[in-house]
Amino acid sequence: MSEPATETPHCKVVLAGTIAKGLLEETQEGLKKLDRKPHLVGFLASADPAARVYAEWTGKTCRENGFDFTLRELDREDLEDALLSANTNPTIDGIIVYYPIFSSRQDQYLQQIVDVSKDVEGLSHRYIFNMYQNIRFLDSHNQKKSILPCTPLAVIKILEYLRVYNTILPYGNRLHGHTVTVINRSEVVGRPLAALLANDGACVYSVDVNDVQQFHRGQGLRKRRHEVVELPGWTLENCLPLSDVVISGVPGDKYKVPLHLLREGAVCINFSSERNFSSEVKEKASIYVPAIGKVTIVVLLRNLLRIMQNRMDAESETANIVEQKETVEEAAPVVS
């Protein structure tokens, strides 16, 4: 549940639905280039209420915007076989699994068996490797963009919308000069998000239950990709006063970001299904985004369009190679 869109003279509250509208316009343009509706299949194999809400939002957004969506509910023991079957089903263009399921390494295994050409969540090894190595394209010609995990990418799109990204700077350096605290270091959202922000030039403090790590690309952004530095003894008391952007995703209804540590005028974004910021955040923040779910779903659709386009390009390239080979063979002299 998101907070009401109230605001103070000091703080602008920006709702996810407002940001999602502009991204949906982009997806409509992408749909016009296809000869059929993309078909996304969601797999729900847990009783997690947040996962069900996300699944329902996904279906609603898909159907309202020209996509086909099928939700398959099944026991978690049947999920592996169902995913392998979906990988080879030509009527399925994209696959999303609503995690957590086993809340263990088994979930990581399931992420890796989804075919990379249907992985709209960007959780396959190749996509994750590219993300952490700051490799942004799948091809040497820089034509096919790699797929990024939906929730971290949604936060990036929100920061772009809020003009935190400086478009005067070169692509890849547009967060230079910003200090960000990310409260959450899960492998699905928090850690990837810290890496993405640091790869774009920010100094990022990644806060977990037990420690703080700093993600950065070195002084003057001299490094090609981010590096991670342990900060022994550091807590939020050290990070928050330094940060002009604070992003929180603690999955608990009792956790609240300590507002007395918050820097005056900070941009605050909540990606937890719970409210990590109390309503008093509007007395100190300059911009507050209370939830990001609607942006995450639109980013999912953008990812689906991208993998379909990448697949179509690959098929076209293969067809061209075959055609060229046949042409060469036909033109070759016959040796008797």
Image (cartoon, rainbow, N blue to C red):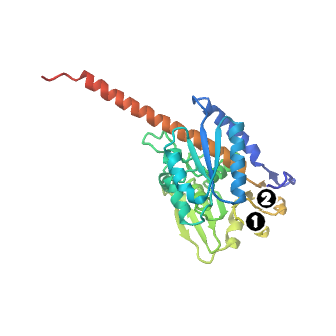
> Is residue 323 or residue 299 the one in the foreground?
323
Q: Mark 1 vs mark 2: which is more N-terminal?
A: 1
SS state under label 1: loop
Q: What quarter of the picture does the C terminus occupy?
A: top left
Q: Which residue is mark 2?
A: 285
Q: Count the numbered circles shown.
A: 2
Crowding at dot 2, Cα within 10 Å, few <14 / some 14-19 / many 20+, comes out as many
Crowding at dot 1, Cα within 10 Å, few <14 / some 14-19 / many 20+, comes out as many
Q: Three-letter amino acid code at disc 2? A: Ala
Q: Three-letter amino acid code at disc 1? A: Leu
> Is residue 244 or residue 300 the one in the foreground?
300
Which residue in the rendered view is the most extreme toward the bottom? 233
Mark 1 and mark 2: Cα distance apart in space = 8 Å
Q: In the rendered structure, are the residues bearing label 1 and label 2 in contact, judged by CB atoms less than 8 Å apart?
A: yes
**Horizontal side, residue 275 vs residue 192: left or right:** right
Which residue in the rendered view is the most extreme toward the left? 336
- Vertical side of 222 occupied by 171: above or below: above
Q: Position of residue 80 (x, y in %)?
A: 53, 55
- Vertical side of 218 occupied by 91: above or below: above
Q: Measuring 18% from the left and 22% from the top, which residue is drawn there?
A: 334
Q: Label for residue 243?
A: none
- Vertical side of 212 occupied by 308: above or below: above
SS state under label 2: loop
Q: Position of residue 226 (x, y in %)?
A: 52, 59
Q: Which residue is mark 1?
A: 262
Q: Measuring 48% from the left and 44% from the top, which residue is drawn there?
A: 88
Residue 31: quarter of image: top right
Does any portion of residue 131 appear in the rendered image? no
Q: What quarter of the picture does the N terminus occupy?
A: bottom right
Q: Position of residue 233 (x, y in %)?
A: 62, 78
Q: Position of residue 335 (x, y in %)?
A: 14, 23
